[in-house]
Image (cartoon, rainbow, N blue to C red):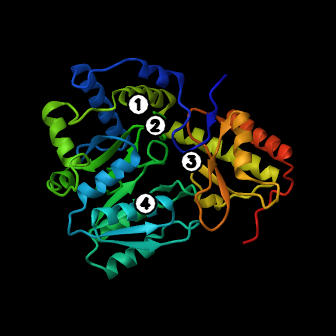
Amino acid sequence: MNDPVLLTPGPLTTSAATKQAMLRDWGSWDGAFNELTASVCRDIAEIAGAGETHVCVPLQGRGTFSVEAALGTLVPKDGKVLVPNNGAYCQRILRILDYLGRPAVALDFREDEPADPACIDAALAADPAITHVAQVHCETGTGILNPLPEIAYTVARRGRRLIVDAMSSFGAIPIDAQSMPFDALIAASGKCLEGVPGMGFVVVRREALAAAAGNCHSLAMDLHDQWIYMQKTGQWRFTPPTHVVAALRAAIDQYREEGGQPARLARYAENCATLVAGMRALGFQTFLADAVQAPIIVTFHAPADAAYDFKIFYRKVREKGFILYPGKLTTVETFRVGCIGVIGAATIRQAVAAIEATFAEMGVTNFAPDKQ
């Protein structure tokens, strides 16, 4: 029996070659593994356009670990962070900052509204105590794409520092450190690079990292300490996720073979367009307007039909070979379908057919959302 296709924003469906790379064991201090780590970091830095100004610091754990590490390392204890907030992962940043004891202010937007650079500019002008802006690029809770280039320029013009959560965009949506000013960009192995979960990384401006000694609240999360140790020894400070690094090496090789960021974006965009067209043909409505929809994950309004039940819907679609994602909104009932991973438009069409068949089995005939 084949594994179900993961139509989720990570973990995601990976290739046979990526899975195969995890069948070898590695010594964590062995020279061959050290070179494997170095090669992965070099390639990530190159994808980000790091040049000589930025470096890639890897970290054990999932993406949220690296978000916390970046905030804890780069924001000084007397810093203050503005968080444009239009979704669940923006709210997670605010929660992390609260745990860290770093002052933060939320700049709230609707969940279907992109962060507005003009509003960010006004907030920075009004509060000179703000030292940093923490911006989610693609808010995975809805799939909305925030206008990162414009936000980056706004923050730079005000002389503040930008930390970007690019968890669900890096590798697919263009981000270039040489043309877009930021202090840190955070992502992870199990997203658009199509590796497996278990390793985060932060592409950091060298000057900002050098100035961050002593900031961090945690030894394990200290990116400055991690970077200094790796530069001296070539090794991770603590036991690394060896198999995850090997899988990411294989995934990046495939990424390059596919054609890099432009090709990855083109495939995801085709997946997204195929999904939206197919679901709208069935009568579903997307939560977001097309103009702000990232080709990563799409949120659909749940049908108002009394026969609809997400748990039954999920189970029946899974039995047909596809794993979907529940909604993450508090105001309306939704479900989400991912567009990323080692899949193409043909797989998306099969998923739409499975969704259609499932609703027929459930007796759902009204796909319009509940009027709220």
Identified at 49% across, 35% down, the residue is 194
Instruction: Confirm whether residue 176 shows in the render.
Output: no
Q: Is residue 95 visible?
A: yes
Whether label 1 touches label 4, CB < 8 Å: no
Name the residue carrying label 1.
Answer: 248
Task: Evaluate if marks 2 and 3 touch, with contact meaning CB atoms under 8 Å apart.
Answer: no
The crowding category of the residue bearing disc 1, from other C-alpha atoms within 10 Å (few below 14, some 14 to 19, many at least 20), is many
Amino acid type of disc 2?
A: Leu
Is 129 left, or right, of 334 in this rendering? left
User: Could you tell me residue 296's position as x and y percent?
Assistant: 56, 47
Q: Can you give x and y, in whole percent of width and height, for residue 95 in the image?
A: 39, 63
Q: Residues within 10 Å of mark 2 (few under 14, many from 20)?
A: many
Task: Answer with mark 3 or mark 4, whichever residue precedes in sequence.
Answer: 4
Q: Which image quarter holds the N terminus? A: top right
Between marks 2 and 4, how big is the CA–CA gap? 23 Å
Which amino acid, mark 3? Ile
Q: Secondary structure at mark 4?
A: helix
Q: CA distance from mark 3 to mark 1?
A: 19 Å
Tag 4 or tag 2, which sits nearer the N-term?
A: 4
Label 4: few (<14), some (14–19) or many (≥20) C-alpha neighbours in 10 Å = some
Q: Which residue is mark 3?
A: 296
Residue 92 circle label: 4
Question: Alpha carbon of mark 3 to alpha carbon of mark 4: how far?
Answer: 19 Å
Q: Nearer the viewer, residue 232 or 180?
A: 232
Query: Which badge, 1 or 2, comes first in the chain's sequence?
Result: 2
Q: Are marks 1 and 2 in contact (CB under 8 Å)?
A: yes
Q: Are marks 3 and 1 in contact (CB under 8 Å)?
A: no
**Could you tell me how far apart the alpha carbons at marks 1 and 4 are, in whole angstroms?**
26 Å
User: Marks 1/2: CA distance?
Assistant: 8 Å
Name the element at disc 2: loop
